[in-house]
Amino acid sequence: MNREKLSSRLGFILLSAGCAIGLGNVYRFPIITGSYGGALFVLIYIGFLILLGLPAMTAELAVGRASQRSIATSFDTLEKKGQKWHLMKYLGVAGNYLLMMFYTLISAWMVIYFVKYLTGSIMEASGEAALTNEFVTMISDPWLSLLSTVGVIAVCFLICSIGLQKGVEKVTKVMMVALFLLMFCLVVYCLTLPNAAEGLKFYLIPSVDNIGDAGIWTVISAAMGQAFFTLSIGIGSVAIFGSYIGKERRLLGEAVTIISLDTSVALMSGLIVFPACFTYNNGVTADAGTVGASFLFTTLSSVFNAMPGGRIVGTLFFLFMIFAAFSTVIAVFENIISFWLETTKLSRLKVSLINIGLVTVLAIPAIFSESFFSDIRLFGKSFMDLEDFTVSNLLLPIGCLVYILFCTTRWGWGWDNYFAEMNTGEKGPRLPRWIKPYMTYVLPVIIVAVLVMSLL
């Protein structure tokens, strides 16, 4: 099989960053930051990104580039004879499908609200109570949810069907550039709001007083969890793009660039949310323990509807959200397609068409979770919430642990092979040797701790 390659390093960076940048960067990060101490939480969060997110991402990228394969056969290619690391492929592909079973629905909600703001129909809803009713009406409409989700699935798979360079890379480049331009415009506008200074003080100046009743250990735990989950590491969705690049550059620098872009989106979202909420909502009032995507459609929408030019701001904001959501969906779909291409003899177009139907069927429980299936609860959760919980709290940390152990222990690919792959190339910083004890012994313990805390 002639393997496709990305046309440029920029394509690799933007695709990988697009996979990591998602809806959680925009709605979850500001709310958790607001609930757990503002600037102090941000500093702790960035620290955990360096300690946890960066080495974990390097492991996934190294496996992808060394094997030149997706999660379907990457472990088969690198493992020693008789080892069973290749069983990770089943957890990985299950994680990709499970993520798309609910993520495509939330992406469809972004499209619906973009249309609502574009047409101005949502501006008639005044106050958070009215917007809550608007949101509940939307999610309980089964046919609107079904048609919009199928549209998202079809569009994103058809983009992937065009090819890696002409479809996935070309479209994602445009979306990511547009995403940053839109964010920049929204940041500039929100910084001119009357109480922007008050919001920025809370967001950018660390203060122990802002922790409130949460307690420092709760803040540390929340920062650790957010740093881990924001990068979507552990199910091979980042490794696939590592498999599409050459050996010209060392991987540590590439991982730093990807994480920096991901973090910049999260930080910029705070520069939008905090000035807006401190001006029109007396601060962020959502509960970090129960935060969900509904924050976008109720609290933030009420802020947009109250501000001058709110219709334009809301339209641009949800367009930016579409780009953030679609970049992740396309990246995960590309991983799914690569899995099929490596395990079947089907063409990219046929695989895409099959998966449009397959993902649509798999998404039905989430699509109907607030309508036909609203009375069904498993472990006290709706289908959508259970799928989200399983991916975020179980599959991602387990998959991440597998990648780390595979790269650092003699029972896997091994530290020497991982270290050599990381430092292959003529440009970029080298991975230092002194990091081996940390990655081999300390990092797995941290990941297990994150897993246990997230389950509890």
Image (tube, grey):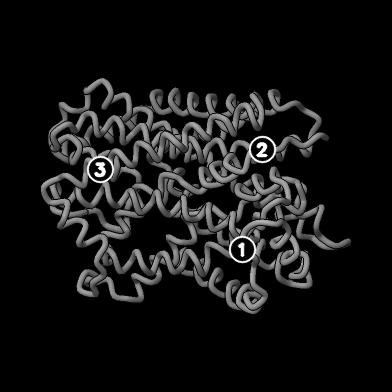
Residue 55 location in percent, x, y? Answer: 59, 65
Secondary-structure class at tag 3: helix
The amino acid beneath tag 1 is Pro
The residue positioned 13% from the left and 48% from the top of the image is 279
Quarter assignment of residue 306: top left
- Residue 328 circle label: none
Above or below 343: residue 21:
below
Above or below 163: residue 78:
below
The amino acid beneath tag 3 is Val
* C-beta proximity under 8 Å, tags 2 and 1: no
The amino acid beneath tag 2 is Leu
- Residue 429 circle label: 1
Question: Is disc 3 surrounded by few (<14), some (14 to 19) or many (20+) residues within 10 Å?
Answer: few
Q: Which of 125 and 269 is in front in this view?
A: 269
Closer to viewer: mark 2 or mark 1? 1
Question: Is disc 1 surrounded by few (<14), some (14 to 19) or many (20+) residues within 10 Å?
Answer: some
Q: Which of 255 and 288 is in front in this view?
A: 255
Question: Disc 3 to disc 2, how far (Cα)?
Answer: 34 Å
Question: Is disc 2 surrounded by few (<14), some (14 to 19) or many (20+) residues within 10 Å?
Answer: many
- Residue at label 3? 188
Question: Disc 1 to disc 3, how far (Cα)?
Answer: 34 Å
